Image: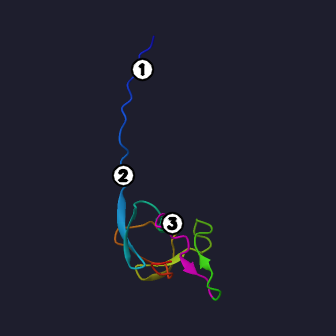
Amino acid sequence: MTRRRARHTREPRPAPTVAVVVDGVRTEVPAAVSVAAALTVCGRTAFRESRPSGEPRGVFCGMGACHECAVTIDGVRGVRACITPVAAGMRVDTGRGASR
């Protein structure tokens, strides 16, 4: 007969978060993820609108090749959200406003 070790159950640790400002609204997002992942967690799937049609655009390739996820970060336009890590205090403007 073998002895079994008692398993201790631990409460899961909450994932660390950082505060960012998305379209003027302060939001807590997971740390150590891409800006695109953080925006998606916030319920944002469209990050910009195409020109001239105005169609919503978001993550397409997820590896920085297509520029569909381009946003403005800390005043710099055209930053690819899928390959940019989120950082505390970052200001992200999707160009779609807080309500979209």
The alpha-carbon separation of the residues under discs 3 and 2 comes to 19 Å
- Prevailing SS of the magenta stretch: loop
Residue 45 belongs to the span the image colors magenta: yes
Residue under circle 1?
4
Vertical position of residue 49 compared to residue 87: above or below: below
Q: Tell me if residue 21 is in the magenta stretch.
A: no
Quarter of the image with the N terminus is top left
Going from N to C along the chain, the mark reached first, 1 or 2, is 1
Q: Residue furthest toward the top?
A: 1
Residue type marked 3: Thr
Residue 14 - label: 2
Q: What is the quadrant of residue 15 in the picture?
A: bottom left
Magenta-highlighted residues: 40-51
Which amino acid, by three-letter code, is at mark 1? Arg
Q: Is residue 66 left or right of residue 97?
A: right
Q: Amino acid at mark 2?
A: Pro
Mark 3 and mark 2 lie on one chain; the one further toward the N terminus is 2
Q: Check disc 3 and report the residue beneath it.
A: 40
- The structure residue drawn at horizontal position 55% and vertical position 70%, both measured from the top left corner, is 45
Q: Nearer the viewer, residue 25 or 81?
A: 25
